[in-house]
Image (cartoon, rainbow, N blue to C red):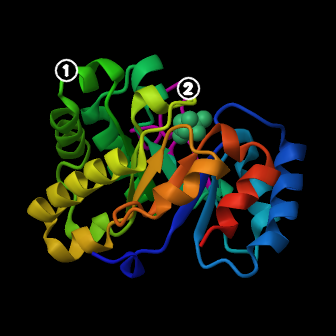
Amino acid sequence: MSHSLRPTAIIGNWKMNKTIAEAKTYVFELTPLMRHSRKYVGLAVPFTMIASAAEAAKGTSIAIGAQNASDAEEGAFTGEISSSMVKEAGASFVILGHSERRQLFHENNALINRKLFRALAADLKVVLCIGETKEERDKGETEKVLCNQLSGCLEGVTALQMANLMIAYEPVWAIGTGKVATPESVQVVHHFCRDQIASQWGQHTAEHQIIQYGGSVKPENAAALLEQPDVDGLLIGGASLSLASFSKFIDLK
Ligand code: PGA
């Protein structure tokens, strides 16, 4: 399988960090660095920054996204924000199913599946996060967990809709811990995921499916990860907060 079917996707996940002013400056400074890049470059920013970041990114190829969205369209859901709202604010994608959402906010595959349909209906691309915990890995359950997450979160999704979706494999034990998974072990998992996608949606869909890796990605370990044939991009938390470090990912071949 060749990389050439799939653009490299580099997405920064700012989590709950930065101010509106910082977001604008970041996007303005990132813009000239994008000129020769053929990668898909996105920033998943806090809700309050979407509009200003999207405004700053106008006319560039930088995609601005949200880190979550509701499974409801509108109504009495105090504190929630819908996919249509983030789309209206200027987001073009949304991260769903991040392990912090799953663990801290008790999101399960069925809820993520409902959110995913709302997001696709609002014309947002979806970055669907999956990944096993350390305990699950130690018990040899990695493939079973990923299989359940993929089938649960993607239930009812058509091959056509898969084109608006990126998968991000983020082993929970690697997120924010400095413990990056080895490129070889990431390749094995990505290949497994691609096989699962092929068995459900066919070879063509699988070959075009972008599968990113996330979890303690740094400029120093990124190249070896991206060299793996089934690693099509990176979802970057901590190392996306400084532009000096994020820009290094854009420069990688
Ligand atoms: P990290 O986070 O790069 O800080 O490990 C990745 C993520 O949570 O998406």
Q: Residue at x 40, y 26 (%)?
A: 102
Residue 39, labelled with which disc? none
Q: Main secondary structure of the magenta part?
A: loop
Q: Which quarter of the figure has residue 200?
A: bottom left
Q: Are marks 2 and 1 in contact (CB under 8 Å)?
A: no
Q: Residue furthest left?
A: 199
- On the image, the x and y values in percent for residue 223 come to 56, 59
Q: CA distance from mark 2 to mark 1?
A: 20 Å
Q: Which quarter of the figure has residue 252?
A: bottom right
Give the mark, 2 or 1, whose residue is nearer the N terminus.
1
Q: Is residue 177 above or below residue 20?
A: above
Residue 139, labelled with which disc? 1
Q: Is residue 124 visible?
A: no
Q: Amino acid at mark 1?
A: Lys
Magenta includes 70?
yes
Q: Is residue 70 above or below residue 94?
A: above
Q: Residue at x 67, y 77 (%)?
A: 37
Task: Give the quarter of the figure containing the N terminus.
Answer: bottom left
Q: Is residue 84 above or below residue 1?
A: above
| Secondary structure found at label 1 | loop
- On the image, the x and y values in percent for residue 227 come to 45, 64
> 84 or 202, which is in the foreground?
202
Q: Assess mark 2: CB under 8 A from ligand 1? A: yes
Q: Residue at x 41, y 75 (%)?
A: 6
In the displayed structure image, the side of residue 147 where residue 106 appears, left or right:
right
Q: Which residue lies under the disc numbered 2?
A: 177
Residue range corresponding to the magenta coloring: 65-82
